[in-house]
Amino acid sequence: FALSMRSWCRLRLFQRALVYGGFATGVAGVASAQGVNPLCIYAKDAPSGKLLCDLAKTNAAGMQMHIEKDPSFNPNERHPGGWTPLMVAAIRGDAPLVDLLLSSGAKVDDEDMYSPSNRRLQYIRHAEFPDTIDARSNTQGFTALFYAVLSGNQEVVRRLLEAGADPNKVDGQGRTAQELAQYLPGPQRQAMDTVFDEEMPKILEARRAQEKRQRQQFPLEQRLMQAIVGQEGPIQAVASAVRRKENGWHDSDHPLVFLFLGSSGIGKTELAKQLAAYVHGAEQEAFIRVDMSED
């Protein structure tokens, strides 16, 4: 009894499906042997099933046709295993598909919720993701940027960063996307570090521009008056001083310092808290209180 190479591969795929356990997984293995995407078997009843089936076997052109035909298309619907279409496109290094999903509204910083504890999901994961990712690995907290780094595709990483991906986000193990570049071969690792080094200044500049727009749309006076009752005069004086510094009208040899005086309960501490949150973006981290009362 002899088997052709193709038949042998089909048999091994079916056996592997059984090893991963469960009748449903075995069915998925049979489907794969017959040329059917196993993801369709597992996810056909899930809201994102059809989208992910299409994504697993098409390119950007095919996905574009799917989007045009389906008015309810939502690129952020998740696979039952917890990952999104953008993550699949990123790990495959498919830049055109990444662009298409981003332009269709995909959230660039959505986090993966996949857990390898489900053995059936491990098989589906292995079928959809390339060998770069071990289906037994815990990737909870991964964003599309993490997967793009592991794919080694610098163009996809660059496009995600340009789309606003946060390079400082950490996964469930406290690692950033750039730190995963250490698992790439030497030349790829160096090239990936270069991409981050080139894009970080642009990201910081874009954030500053966004913060400036937000401040223009929501002036400091309004922010302070929401938290402090009355005290219009002091609020105007503080806001004017901060705005002058933001516009570059200050002496670098004389840092901006405020001294708030007055009786208890008029809002000195709250004004300092709100000012710290406005300038530094995080009230808890930026405000330090030193109580020097004699009580």
Image (cartoon, rainbow, N blue to C red):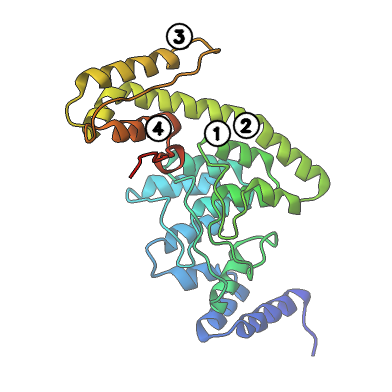
Between circles 4 and 1, the one closer to the viewer is 4
> Where is residue 118 shown, x and y percent of the image?
53, 77
Instruction: Give left or right: position of 172 versus 230.
Output: right
Kindly give the residue lying farthest to the bottom in the view shown. Answer: 1
**Is residue 27 depicted above or below 122 in this figure?**
below
- Identify residue for label 3: 249
The CA distance from mark 2 to mark 3 is 29 Å
Can see residue 36? no
- Cα separation, mark 4 vs mark 1, equals 29 Å
- Is 200 located above or below residue 101 in the figure? above
> Looking at the image, is mark 1 or mark 2 nearer the viewer?
2
Circle 3 SS class: loop
Q: CA distance from mark 4 to mark 3?
A: 20 Å
Give the labeled residue for mark 2. 199
Front position in the image: 17 or 139: 139
Residue that mark 4 sits on? 276
Q: CA distance from mark 4 to mark 2?
A: 28 Å
Amino acid type shown at disc 2: Glu
Q: Which residue is mark 1?
A: 162
CA neighbours of label 3 inside 10 A, class few (<14), some (14 to 19), many (20+) = few
Residue 66 vertical position relative to residue 7 in the rendered view, above or below: above
What is the three-letter code of the residue carrying label 1? Glu
Q: Is residue 291 visible?
A: yes
Nearest the eye: 209 or 62:
209
Instruction: Compare residues 259 and 30 and report the one nearer the observer.
Output: 259
Tags 1 and 2 touching, CB below 8 Å: yes
Residue 224 location in percent, x, y?
A: 27, 29
Distance Cα–Cα, label 1 vs label 2: 8 Å
